[in-house]
Amino acid sequence: MVAKKPRVVVVGAGVAGLAAARRLCGAGGDRFEVTVVEAADRAGGRVLTSEFAGHRVEMGATWVQGVVGSPVYALARDAGAIDGDGADGGGGLPYERMDGFPDRLLTVAEGGEVVDADQVAGPVEELYRGMMEAARAGEASGGGGVEDYLRRGLRAYQAARPGGGKELQEIEEALLAMHINRERTDTSADDLGDLDLTAEGEYRDFPGDHVTIPGGYSRVVDHLVAALPPGTVRLGLRLRRLDWGGTPVRLHFADGAGTLAADHVILTVSLGVLKASIGKDASAAGAVAFDPPLPQFKREAVSRLGFGVVDKLFMEVELVASPEPEVGGGGDEQLLYTSAPPVFPFLHMAFRGHVSKIPWWMRGTESICPVHAGSSVALAWFAGREAAHLESLPDDEVVRGVHATLDSFLPGPRRGGATATSRWRVKRIKRSRWATDPLFLGSYSYVAIGSSGDDLDLMAEPLPRAQDAGERAPPRVLFAGEATHRTHYSTTHAAYLSGVREADRLLQHYR
């Protein structure tokens, strides 16, 4: 008599789910019957490579945070996405940060005044970076939120440096606010006052450079899918209810797609979906109903942890013709623009609230920078309330907001008493919309004030808990995803490692 194989259903074909499935199908040999169900019409989850204006762009995951020992970098290399097809590993298209991090930044204050890089902008950036490095090394003092910590540091810096009046202090405060916007997009925290300072000391990157993937992040996803037996991944199945009180676990799908039964479910939905699922409205967009409800320890961990939204706004920019110079001046500038058109700068923006035409949501970005030196595609990152609002705007309103910002920070020459406008204009845009996507309801997790790394560990605990059901009781629902990893949360590394962890949990159970 042939023994029945344990049936494992993995919910979500993102990096975590695919990693779990690959591990079970590989290390598990033929011991498991594995199915991956995915609500979308594609695999990848929050990994989505696209094209825009002749460039390869990432709408979601962008960076590999350290290459030494990184499983994600190894996957990209194995997929041929680092140095495979073509010189760039992906068929010749230029891609984000293909030239690394820029070393020539143009920092401008609202109104168009260039900020001195050596005397003003550089020291504030050095202060910010040093303080965040200390926080992540566990060397920060004072507790509380990250924003208060950074502002305390700026006040101490201003008190210690000689000279400087009110104008300089305002510029320095605007520069720190610029770096705070950067940190918001790095962490997804809407308010850095809600980002726990102590927990920053537990977060870890892998050693080595932070890089983008020449062939596109989606090549990693394709590589993981290709490693699975044909038919393992089933698209278009959106989980609406999970009955996990006994064996088998039953999965109910939306739109009359039926049910599946499983001995084990590896759930990789986002923390945003879990937050919606423990809310009062079980029918809310994206929510999954649990029967029985998730236990209190799991609901509290879900509630305490932070989950924010980060969006990217890509813009194809062009240089418009410069106006005719007035008699007696401007001729050299006209010659410069016609003989050697400038490239769009790596623009960092210190907002001071002086220009009323700049919309409030544009003030939430640190920079507008070309995706690589000389590119006609520029990128701005947004987090929190600004990102969510950006998702709601029509394209023409977004373009107007960007133009108002460029007019202030990169003004062209004035003619008579006319208001200066930038020579740079936006031809078209492409943007992500992670907050309003019901399959994600945001971007990635952070440890909020009132939470801790312990909550990330609680997120990873399977159900039923061993202490409730006995050490050898089979885990019916297992949890994977970036928000279940204590030290690498918010990254694709965390997603991958957590998927392998839960597969290994099942392998250990059936050893």
Image (cartoon, rainbow, N blue to C red):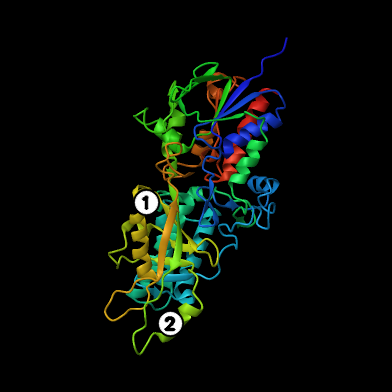
Query: Is disc 1 placed on a helix, strand or loop?
Result: helix
Q: For the residue marked with disc 2, what is the amino acid?
A: Glu
Picture quadrant of residue 110: bottom left
The residue that appears at 34% across and 85% down in the rendered structure is 326
Q: For residue 152, say whether it is visible.
A: no
Q: Quadrant of the C terminus?
A: top right
* x then y, percent, for residue 361: 34, 56
Between 315 and 346, the one lying in front of the other is 315
Between 224 and 50, the one lying in front of the other is 50
Q: Which residue is mark 2?
A: 333
Q: For the residue marked with disc 1, what is the amino acid?
A: Leu
Is 152 displayed left or right of 493 in the figure? left
Query: Is disc 2 placed on a helix, strand or loop?
Result: helix
Looking at this view, name the residue that lies furthest to the bottom.
328
Is 327 displayed left or right of 317 in the figure? left
Q: Is residue 204 above or below residue 101?
A: above
Picture quadrant of residue 480: top right
- Which mark sits nearer the N-terminus, 1 or 2? 2
Q: Quadrant of the N terminus?
A: top right
Q: Is residue 272 above or below residue 293?
A: below
* x then y, percent, for residue 341: 49, 75
Q: Which residue is mark 1?
A: 390
Give the spatial CA distance, label 1 vs label 2: 36 Å
